[in-house]
Image (cartoon, grey):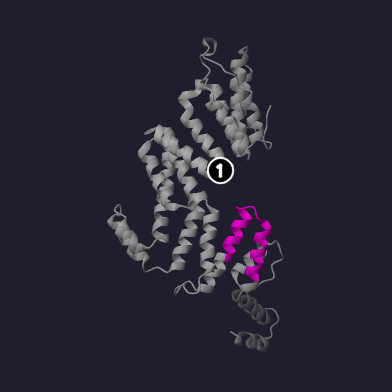
Amino acid sequence: RCQRHGHRHTGFDALDRLKNLKGGGKILKSLINYKMGQLLFAQKDFPGAYDYFSKVEPVGYSKAYAEVNIPENLKLKAEMMAGRCLVEDGKGAEAIRHFEKLLDNNFYYKSFGEILTLLALSKAKAGRPDEAKALYLRVINEYKKSPQSAAACYALGLLYEKTFGDLENAFKYFAMASLEYPDCDEAKLAAERNKSLRSLRFLLLNPDSLLVVDTTLTKQDSMHLDSLKRTSKIRRLFSAADLFLFSLSNGDSAVLRYREILSQDTGGDSTLSLTEAKMKALYAIGWIHKHLAGRPSEADTLFREVILRFPATEYAKASQRALGEPLTIQTREDSVRTRYLSAESLYYHLGDCLAALRAFDVF
């Protein structure tokens, strides 16, 4: 019986029941292999999932197993999932060959739109974004008003946003996904991302130019843009970085905005000085390198820079913790607290009133 990390997975219980059915030959074997592949894919065991998907054979409906839910075109579904395993496992070139082979099989012509989208994803992952873009556009043009077109719009929006850094085109294709086929997962994901990108456009572009050229703005949008004109550039950059990081899970784009803050010579406002802004930005870049980008040595360098440039601050303390070092840094508040407790101890524990008064006089 299959176990993961000492806990039984309910999906594996279901597979055990399938295995106990008598007979079935390749029908049940293929269904079990497909389900095993799905479970391992969900657990990010992509090589293991690929092996199971590859064992699925072409099967059809069987009256003997009418009560068993056998997906239509099970073999094709397994082939596409096997290709996704290759993509997720970083085997882009192998994934490209896999999906191109599927396109050579005319028996799968009804699913060519989905296969082309997966082929585009493989090319994007393999460092061939221009070829990926061309394939996405082909799907959008050839499969209009379909789930395939909506999925391609969403994927193309992600490509523009994350690879090309073109937020305007990303915004365009996320918006288009809902128009192509609103009742699918990709259209809903695109709508969420579109909402975040709309906020980013307001933060990063010139408010005055948006008020002139964007005919889709509502009265509420115009009021929001007016308020942004009174917000410091550093505040807007922080808000944009937060959107990239927490709403769009795009650490690289967040880092670009934090670095832009570090390059500012003037800025800040009554509640956020330029020095504090740079301190926060430098620490944030280190955090992204450490926790999201998998670049621990670069992160450690940045944390040490925070400690050097901004000693006796909360961010210096946080950097020391991130480096795994004993906490020796004290902020001004920490020092005041330590002196106060020392003075209090002189009075209450040692009974030395004069020494306590001299210590309290420091405050």
Residue occupying the point 44% across, 39% down: 137
Q: Considering the whole magenta stretch, tell me its main secondary structure.
A: helix
Specify whether 354 is left or right of 140: right
What percent of the width, then of the height, locates residue 204?
42, 60
What percent of the width, then of the height, locates residue 352?
69, 85
* Figure check: 167 above or below 132: below
Q: Does the magenta run of residues contain 35?
A: no
What percent of the width, then of the height, locates residue 1?
69, 26
Q: Nearer the viewer, residue 205 or 46?
A: 205
Specify whether 213 is left or right of 237: left
Q: Nearer the viewer, residue 294 or 24?
A: 294
* Figure check: 268 above or below 12: below
CA neighbours of label 1 inside 10 A, class few (<14), some (14 to 19), many (20+): some
For disc 1, the marked residue is 128
Q: Does the magenta run of residues contain 290?
A: yes
Can you say which quadrant of the picture contains the C terminus? bottom right
Specify whether 216 is left or right of 59: left
Local SS, label 1:
loop
Q: What count of labels does the image hold? A: 1
* Mark 1: amino acid: Arg
Do we see residue 184 in this rendering?
no
Extent of the magenta region: 282-307
Do we see residue 110 in this rendering?
yes
Q: Nearer the viewer, residue 58 or 346?
A: 58
* Figure check: 305 above or below 52: below
Residue occupying the point 47% across, 24% down: 109
Residue occupying the point 38% across, 45% down: 175
Specify whether 21 is left or right of 118: right
The quadrant holding residue 8 is: top right
Residue occupying the point 62% across, 54% down: 291
